[in-house]
Image (cartoon, helix red, strand yellow):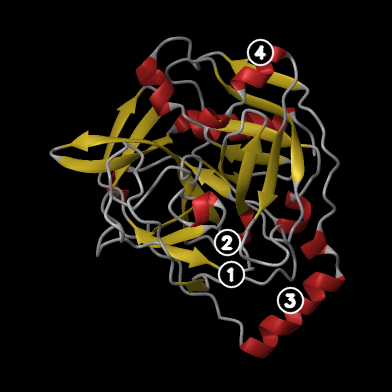
Amino acid sequence: MKRLSERRRLTAAEFETCAGEFERSGRSRAATTPQRTGRGVVALPRRGRGEHTPGQLAGFLPKDMPVHTRPQTEIVALHAHSRGLTGECRPPFASSGDGRHLLTDHTWPWILTGRVTNSDGMAGPGVLVGARLMLTARRLRPSRSIARGSWWMTFSPHFDNGADPNAPFGSSNVSDLAHYNAERDTEYVARHDFMLCRLFEPMGHQLGFLGATTFADNWRGLQVWHSIGYPADVDDGMRPAVQINQSVEHDHEDDNSRHIETEASLDHGDAGGLFFSWFDDGHVRLCGVVSDAGIADGCLDHALASGDDMVSLINWGRATWPE
């Protein structure tokens, strides 16, 4: 995989013109749906070994949508003594190697990631992967509410509590969700910590969506991946943080799934965030969903759930849940 050549950057005047057209078109004020409860929960069976999987899926860039290959950012203010995904106590400033910045860019593809909340009181990031499809971590499944017979999830693209308005592209509730039936296999659960959600509102028609790809072994160590999340140590998970040019070091493959390790700076609230990159064909694809963390070779490494099963789940959603 090679880095995509930098697309021509918009001048300040061009950006303001595009932003004005975006506003007039109604795209930047997507109608917020009334609160609706979820309808269906699908637990897909394990896929058979060697079952065909598309190696990659294309994304969608709407016509005249402003694009930045590098996002506009600001310096991030971290909370003191936050705890990472594994619960370790961090100093007031995470470390000199912390690559996170506050994401302030309102262009494609940076607007496709947003904040997910649910009826169990949990929150985290998710990303548009289809006209009505949002991908997030399985751990954001509102299991207690589902067991009670009434549940809801809400997705707000590019939500930023420090901005006015804080949900500039509106929001949508989730009508249905799907994930693999992991049963009690904890290793399987870790490799499949992703969940596909169908939205009531087809937000991807106006905003676009990302493609997806399986991971190739020769991508290890390439500093080409970008990550967006809502970490707890950035305004209590209420503002989007971005890291660019991150790498992944190791991956562990098992049948149709992978666990990918990265040393990117991640915190509680990042689970469900994505790692994505620009590809030579002009598409932007994600390769994994932020899952958990662990110690490998004496170093703290955060992990991504990835693999053929992730791509297959998105492909299943695009085919099964019409736009």
Residue 104 image point, x, y percent:
57, 69
Q: Residue at x 68, y 85 (%)?
A: 14
- Would you say residue 279 is visible in this rendering? no
User: How far apart, in angstroms, are the residues tagged by discs 4 and 3?
Assistant: 44 Å
Q: Farthest residue in the top direction?
A: 184
Badge 4 or badge 3: first in the primary sequence: 3
Q: Is residue 134 above or below residue 183?
A: below
Query: What's under tag 1, amino acid-wise?
Result: Asp
User: How far apart, in angstroms, are the residues tagged by discs 1 and 2?
Assistant: 7 Å
Q: Check disc 2 and report the residue beneath it.
A: 110
CB within 8 Å, label 3 to label 2:
no
Q: Residue at x 43, y 42 (%)?
A: 268
Q: Check disc 1 and report the residue beneath it.
A: 105
Badge 2 or badge 4: first in the primary sequence: 2
Query: What's under tag 4, amino acid-wise?
Result: Ala
Pick the residue in front: 298 or 212. 298
Label drawn at residue 147:
4
Badge 1 or badge 2: first in the primary sequence: 1
Q: Which element type, helix, strand or loop, lies under badge 4?
A: helix
Q: Check disc 3 and report the residue beneath it.
A: 19
Q: Which element type, helix, strand or loop, lies under badge 2?
A: helix
2 or 4: mark nearer the eye = 4
User: How far apart, in angstroms, are the residues tagged by discs 2 and 4?
Assistant: 35 Å
Query: What's under tag 3, amino acid-wise?
Result: Ala
Badge 3 or badge 1: first in the primary sequence: 3
Query: What's under tag 2, amino acid-wise?
Result: Trp
Label 4 crowding class (10 Å Cα cut-off): few <14, some 14-19, many 20+? few
Q: Which element type, helix, strand or loop, lies under badge 1?
A: loop
CB within 8 Å, label 4 to label 3:
no
CB within 8 Å, label 4 to label 1:
no
